[in-house]
Image: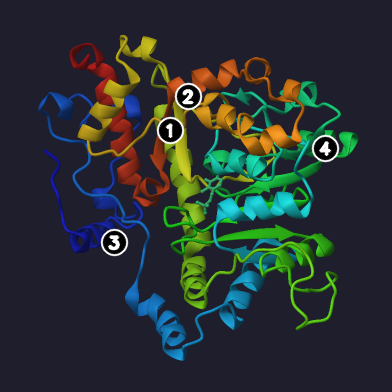
Amino acid sequence: MKKKISRRNFVKYNSVAGLGTAAGLQITGDVFNIGKNSSSTPAILGGTPSMGHDWPDWPIWKPQIDEERVIEVIRSGVWSRAAVVKEFEEKWAETLGVKRCLTVVNGTNALNAALAQYEIGWGDEVLVTPYTFIASVSCILFNGAIPVFVDVDPETFQMDPAKIEEKITSNTAAILPVHILGLPCDMDPIMKIAKKHKLKVIEDACQGWLAEYDNKKLGTIGDAGCFSFQNSKNLPMGEGGAIVSNDDEFMDRCTSFHNYGNPYGSVSGEVGAGTIRIGTKLRITEYQAAIGLAQLKRLEDQTELRSKNAELLKGKIKDVPGILPYRLYDKTNRAAFHLFPFRYKEEEFKGLSRSKFLEALRAEGVPCSSGYRPLNKMPYLENAFNSKFYKKFYPSERLDYDSYAEVNECPLNDQLCDEAVWFTQNLLLGSKEDMNNIANAIEKIYKNAEKIK
Ligand SMILES: *Cc1c(COP(=O)(O)O)cnc(C)c1O
């Protein structure tokens, strides 16, 4: 059904419609009196899809602008870590307003390394949200610690700061706030609790590039912040990640760790004499950094556009009964919107199930997904507890999975996982008209929920 157009035509369309600036093409009006498409037949029932074209491709690559540096690097034959990686690190640190940045192979290993270099491991507990990507939790197990799940605030999709303190025990070593979907956690209360209980704070900002809370960039508020530059992320280089911090000694340890444990800065030893502490190899290549530098040039404008479009779209859909878009905490200056989330209440849609709603939305030409499943109740946890590894280091009462599962129940997150709907970040790089059309599509489905069901 969906009318396919070529990438070239899309680019043409998008530059004609601009970012919604060509008055002739702009549709005005609110979602409930738009009239154009919303009264027509939903695409899933044979009507015309709301979206007449494809979405912006991801990642964006413009050969004329982006390739010169990459080709230069490739032709130089210097492919292993050198000046271009350093340049990217300096630029990323400067962009965030943080003292140091170290790139590593991916966000997963940024988290693994950050925990390890604060010596968070065997015996420790780390507080984390169940509403996240697996790497936010696997880094805790990877270091031999035990994840303790803090339930979410379903309105914000983030770890609820009001539920943190009740989970703190004498074993708690750190809080790992995840700015999930690119929406900032409420860092003020989190930092206050951490200070009071002397806990480290390692921010998983792997979806939080250039988002700001209380005029500080995400990843720079806690003791350390971790980023991902994987292909789907807002700042993509294929694979890649970074650790940022103002803590020089910690960054020296991370730098040493990512290079076999060789001496670096305050991690001193005779340079050239070899490894002096536990380390591994997590270095990225020069051509990855060159790709990252090209992408970094457009990140600010893209972040601003996503933020504006998200606000626009939120305004248009928030009054549709059963559609509950995200709420941002008061101190949020800007979100990164790696994903645009809302909760879907099927009872307001005549009982139309979420999966059928998603199907109808996709038929309208709007890619969407149902998002994460509860990470606090998946088999990897019990399997870790049953591993030789864990049994060697923990007394059996700490590995009693049934009581662990009970303490770690997160009923609000269970419900959130059943209700969430996501749009990916590239949809928010569309035009104002695109946002109108998404809103139209949702309204069309709302009006025809009974028939679609
Ligand atoms: C992507 C992501 C990671 C892991 O990053 P990779 O670069 O894919 O290893 C960690 N945490 C969150 C929240 C992520 O979205």
How many angstroms separate mark 3 from mark 2 (CA)? 37 Å
Q: Earlier in the sequence, mark 3 or mark 2?
A: 3
Q: Quadrant of the N terminus?
A: top left
Task: Report whether 324 appears left or right of 2.
Answer: right
How many angstroms separate mark 3 from mark 1 (CA)? 31 Å
Task: Identify the secondary structure beneath mark 3.
Answer: helix
> From the viewer's perspective, is the residue at label 3 or at label 1 nearer?
1
Residue position for label 3: 15
Task: Identify the secondary structure beneath mark 2.
Answer: helix
Amino acid at the residue labelled 1: Gly
Task: Identify the secondary structure beneath mark 1.
Answer: loop
Q: Residue 65, position in %: x, y?
A: 39, 77
The answer, for residue 226, to whether it is visible in the render is: yes
Residue 371 numbered tag? 1
Which residue is located at x 51 percent, y 28 percent?
Answer: 379
In the rendered image, the residue lying farthest to the bottom is: 76
> From the viewer's perspective, is the residue at label 3 or at label 2 nearer?
2
Residue position for label 2: 417
Amino acid at the residue labelled 2: Cys
Q: Are marks 1 and 2 in contact (CB under 8 Å)?
A: yes
Which residue is located at x 64 percent, y 23 percent?
Answer: 151
Characterize the local packing of mark 4: few (<14), some (14-19) or many (20 or more) Cα atoms within 10 angstroms.
some
